[in-house]
Image: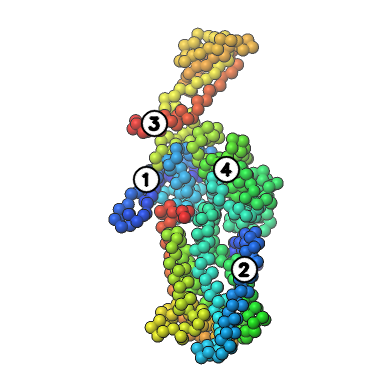
Amino acid sequence: MRDIRPLLGKPLAFLVRDFKIAASYRLQFVMQGFGILLTTFSFSLIDKMLGGQNLPALSPYGGDFFAFVLIGIAFTDYLTISTTTFANEIRNAQMVGTLEALLVTPTSMTTILLSSYGYNLLATSLRVIFYLLFGTLIFGVQLQLPGFATFLITFFLTLLPFFGLGLLSAAFILVFKQGNPISTFLAMSSGLLGGMLYPVSVLPTWLKPFSAMLPITHGLEAMRQVLLNGAGIVEIRKQLLILALFSILLLAIGIYALYASLKVARKEGSLLHY
Amino acid sequence: MLPVIELSQISKSFTERNWKTFLFRKSYPVQALEDVSLTVNKGEIMGLLGPNGAGKTTLIKILATLITPDLGSGTICGFDICSQSHRVREKIGLVSTNDRTFYWRLSGRDNLSFFASLYNLWGQDKTQQIEKVLELTDMTDKADYRFMSYSAGQKQRLAIARAMLSEPEILLLDEATASLDPIAARSLLDLTRNTLAAKEQKTILWCTHNLTEADEICDRLTILHQGRILQSGTPAEIHNCLGYKQSYRLVVDSLHPSLQNQQDYQPILEKEQGAYACTLTIDHARVPELLKSLAGSGVGVYECSQIKRPLEAAFTELVLRKQKGS
């Protein structure tokens, strides 16, 4: 049997590292749990204020505002960590001083970055599970149980373009150290144009083309169709195709930018600067 | 002698980027290294000496593949430092003075376990290797304490333990004793000389501005100044190239005239247990000739030892000569 330890060993080492460091800050663990409960509770109050009205703009998603927002918040969380984790890993390692030790090992920068994603993915998944559990068990949100394959394909195709953006962010950090435009752009665009808190159908007509140019719009739309309407691959094929195209384009740009920025930073001698 | 580090005509300059350079498209490059060629043989401890800003750390970073040179080429164990950086990193272990290269909230063992995975060590091999390097650096008892609780000396020992995880052929030690008290520094020097070099047979590039320790543990020295190599060779060769003659201490049973004719002859008048001690200055190559002549004259020689001149003197003179342009 092929030895899979080289493939899994490094991501596992990063996962253990990050878990042990996070566990050493116990209060942060507890505060995160409170944060999830408070966010969910406050949106349930907005839902209560709306009096469970079946809003026309939300009818393609079953009409439940709370369920709509819950999916928006939960999966925007995934997309945010996918975009910020790589840049944060480099920035933290530059600031703390561990980047030198990481880069003199025979482990490529891509492996370091992808491996550093594991803990955040796990922590975010736990957060999302808690969001959905609180939503369904305490606040009565009705979720459809999707087919496992449909969910998995939609989930990964939603994440992949953000990996590309994440690598691009990391490239910016390597060269410019601060002022990462990708994170700023993503934070602004996902809140305003991506349909996190309201459907993009309510946007002014002139803003809709801009919204369509963002992978988050298609990702959230696909996830909501799967989780709120029980849609299958065929029903969301348009979104999946767009996400696949975004994935190819952004991953290619991200990987190229990362290696180009590494080359520049090594040339300038600024790899370890912050 | 098998060369394991070979650098040929390495040059590196850094250009500062700020708003002025951006607006006016003017840059002011600082030459960090210029035309540096260096060979380090297997099993050797090579001292890289120089004042602050001489280019030592830049050279170490080039060897560690963290910086690419502008010009020149180099190999480590036959692998090109630019195009085969991944293979080069398998052959080196880097120890710097920066203790922030560890995760302070993790224990020493957890730190080693994490980095061992990055060196492709798994399972039983990883556990055994961690135990080995902890034992080697005398850190076994402290391994389960958090890194933040270590003393400066223990942190440096753990840095050496980490560098040894992959059993590298070459250790790059950059100012390894810089933040240590004399006792911890002595302990680290002993570890380097007796364990890493003698027992583990590692090739070591010892980068320092502490001339006494370099003189003590290095087989050969390379002196850098303003990015250029001023001198390279054994400590004795560096003294010799300055025209210094060596001083010797002789203990003999009689003060023969051939001794008294030597340059800077200084007898110690008191007899030491029936023998006479004296110091004199003589070319290293002429010592056997003198001893033969004394033996031929029936003089008993009980001791003939070289009096070491501090390296500081040679280093200072080299740098001053360079500054005066001679």
| Residue at the farthest right position | B141
**Residue B275 image position (x, y, % from top left):** 60, 11
C-alpha distance separating marks 3 and 1: 20 Å
**Which mark lies nearer to you, 2 or 4?**
2
The residue located at (59%, 54%) in the rendering is B103
* Residue assigned mark 2: A32
The residue located at (45%, 22%) in the rendering is B245
Q: How many marks?
A: 4
A184 relative to B195, above or below: below
C-alpha distance separating marks 1 and 4: 31 Å
**Which mark lies nearer to you, 3 or 4?**
3
* SS at circle 1: strand
- Mark closer to the chain start, 1 or 4: 1
Q: Amino acid at mark 1?
A: Gln
* SS at circle 4: loop
- Residue B31's label in the rendered image is 1
Task: Work out whether residue A252 can be spotted.
Answer: no
Quarter of the figure with the C terminus of chain B: top left
C-alpha distance separating marks 3 and 4: 34 Å
